[in-house]
């Protein structure tokens, strides 16, 4: 793997992370105007339309009718995951939701053990314990998480904890579906179907956004689609270990965006808990790495 390829991969992946954190920030800002389901609808439909333009411009692969059942299953999971995530984001500090979201790889390990009866190594149990401890520090750490912040709703905390679990289930499903579908076509189909599924709920108490909220409503889908495409293309050019480090930078970007746009100043328990979760993910990635071939 050439140095140029690695450099371009880092630039693409890092840009993708920034785009996705910016999407989260847009959702947080829209929480003052739109309902959770309306935000999910705007994000999914917008991403589907932008991805359709991308596929048409690049003459890529379109979704196949034969995969409709798979696409519906992923769309249902997307609605559930995005619904919980976008419920939590406007009600909790951005960096808090981002830190708890990093527990998804740990849930993938548990799902592999429970569903696919994969054996969990002792080191993997240590990783799970670190991740659980980090989450507990963030949720129950006490002290001042954000200056002037009252602590958030219990339901928002529950949504922030469960969203990564649902995302982990989605990742497991994607892993089994990705061999037969191109990434852009797969994502376009599931986001469009998710928008259709959530439309009846989004149609309740419709509010037409104006001004900056209208701009964010259009932008949220573009940021999600662009972030996904940049991440996928970056991952193709990078070793998994390098990509993981860049992925963890999302917590720093969430803290920066939260401070710049919402005046959120995270307390020490967030950084301590986030460090524990990142350490758990690093350990999990190391365990999952295949052994080097014997020469």
Image (cartoon, helix red, strand yellow):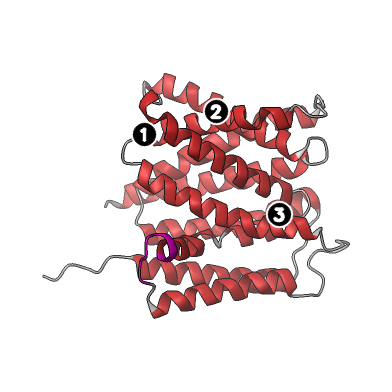
The magenta span reads: 113-119
Residue shown at 56%/69% (left/top)?
277
Nearer the observer, 22 or 277:
277
Front tag of 3 and 2? 2
Nearer the observer, 14 or 39:
39
Residue 59 vertical placement versus 284 (above, below) = above
Nearer the observer, 73 or 186:
73
- The residue at which mark 1 appears reads as 182
Residue shown at 50%/28% (left/top)?
51
Front tag of 3 and 1? 1
**From mark 1 to mark 2, how far is it between C-alphas?**
16 Å
The picture places residue 154, in percent across and down from the top left corner, at 79, 60
**From mark 3 to mark 2, how far is it between C-alphas?**
26 Å
Q: Crowding at label 2, few (<14), some or many (≥20) Cα neighbours within 10 Å?
A: many
Secondary structure beneath dot 3 equals: helix
Residue shown at 78%/37% (left/top)?
35
Residue 277 vertical placement versus 111 (above, below) = below
Front tag of 1 and 2? 2
Secondary structure beneath dot 1 equals: loop
Disc on res. 131: none
Whichever of labels 3 and 2 marks the residue nearer the N terminus, that label is 3
Q: Within the magenta stretch, is there residue 261? A: no
- The residue at which mark 3 appears reads as 94
- The residue at which mark 2 appears reads as 192
Query: What is the total number of numbered labels drawn onto the structure image?
Result: 3
């Amino acid at each position: 793997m050439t140095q140029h390829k690695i450099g371009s991969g880092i630039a693409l992946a890092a840009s993708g992370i920034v785009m996705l954190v910016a999407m989260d920030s847009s959702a947080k800002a829209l929480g003052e105007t739109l309902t959770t389901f309306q935000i999910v609808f705007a994000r999914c439909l917008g991403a589907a339309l932008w991805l359709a333009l991308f596929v048409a411009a690049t003459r890529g692969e379109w979704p196949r009718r034969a995969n409709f059942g798979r696409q519906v299953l992923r769309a249902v999971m997307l609605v559930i995951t995005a619904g919980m995530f976008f419920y939590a984001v406007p009600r909790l500090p951005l960096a808090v939701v981002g830190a708890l979201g990093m527990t998804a790889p740990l849930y993938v390990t548990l799902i592999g053990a429970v569903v696919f009866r994969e054996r969990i190594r002792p080191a993997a149990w240590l990783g799970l314990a670190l991740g659980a401890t980090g989450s507990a520090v963030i949720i129950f750490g006490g002290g001042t998480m954000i200056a002037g912040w009252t602590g958030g709703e219990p339901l928002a905390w529950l949504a922030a904890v469960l969203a990564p679990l649902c995302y982990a289930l989605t990742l497991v499903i994607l892993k089994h579906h990705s061999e037969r579908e191109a990434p852009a076509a797969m994502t376009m189909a599931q986001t469009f179907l998710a928008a259709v599924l959530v439309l009846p709920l989004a149609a309740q108490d419709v509010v037409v956004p104006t001004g900056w909220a209208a701009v964010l409503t259009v932008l949220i889908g573009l940021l999600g689609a662009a972030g996904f495409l940049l991440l996928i293309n970056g991952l193709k050019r990078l070793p998994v270990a390098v990509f993981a480090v860049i992925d963890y930078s999302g917590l720093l970007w969430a803290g920066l965006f939260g401070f710049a746009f919402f005046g959120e100043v995270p307390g020490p328990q967030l950084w301590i808990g986030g460090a524990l979760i990142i350490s758990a993910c690093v350990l999990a990635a190391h365990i999952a790495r295949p052994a080097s071939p014997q020469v």
